[in-house]
Amino acid sequence: MYAMKPILEPDVLDLLNNGRFDGEMEGYILSDGGDLFGWSLFRIDGDVTTMLDILPPNEMFMDGLIRASVAYGEARGATKFTFNKDNEHFMKYKRIFFDEEGDVISNDKLFTPCEGE
């Protein structure tokens, strides 16, 4: 069984960041309880969650890592999110799901359920 959990250890965040991003950040890990399969790094700045980096084990887990990260930001007051444009995973995701949106996207666009008939 896979689990996604917030990264609560500053040393783990530092290890995954590897000096690439400045300032405070948050993260999620994806594991099976023993092995680390994927992770995300993000920053909450006021009302915006900035997705900094992501390493999904495959495309199936990417949406879940993004949603968990944005939801974490929303629980702390962020109402919008944006992606690091230098990350190819994020840019592909944005093209597929948010191509018509600007750089900063309302959380409602990610969490609003589909309307049924």
Image (cartoon, rainbow, N blue to C red):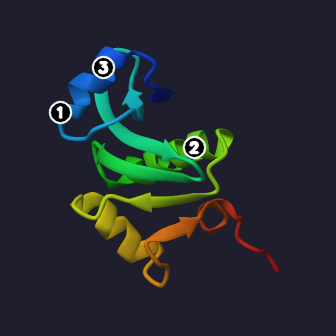
Could you say whether the residue bearing mark 1 is in a helix, strand or loop?
A: loop
Residue count near mark 3 (Cα–Cα under 10 Å), binned few <14, some 14–19, many ≥20: few
Lateral position of residue 23 relative to residue 67, left or right = left
Could you say whether the residue bearing mark 2 is in a helix, strand or loop?
A: helix
Q: Amino acid at mark 2?
A: Gly
Within the image, what quadrant is residue 11 found in?
Answer: top left
Q: CA distance from mark 2 to mark 1?
A: 22 Å
Q: Position of residue 83 (x, y in %)?
A: 38, 60
Seen at 31% across and 46% down, the residue is 54
* Nearer mark to the viewer, of 1 and 3: 1
Q: Position of residue 19 (x, y in %)?
A: 17, 33
Figure check: 116 above or below 24 = below
Q: Pointer 2: what residue?
A: 73
CB under 8 Å between callouts 1 and 3?
no
Q: List the single residue furthest toward the right.
A: 117
Q: Amino acid at mark 1?
A: Gly
Residue count near mark 2 (Cα–Cα under 10 Å), binned few <14, some 14–19, many ≥20: many
Q: Pointer 3: what residue?
A: 12
Point out the tag, 2 or 3, that comes first from the N-terminus: 3
Q: Pointer 1: what residue?
A: 19
Figure check: 18 above or below 97 = above
Q: Position of residue 39 (x, y in %)?
A: 34, 36
Could you say whether the residue bearing mark 3 is in a helix, strand or loop?
A: helix
Q: CA distance from mark 1 to mark 3?
A: 12 Å
Q: CA distance from mark 2 to mark 3?
A: 19 Å
Seen at 64% across and 56% down, the residue is 79
Image quadrant containing the C terminus: bottom right
Seen at 67% across and 64% down, the residue is 108
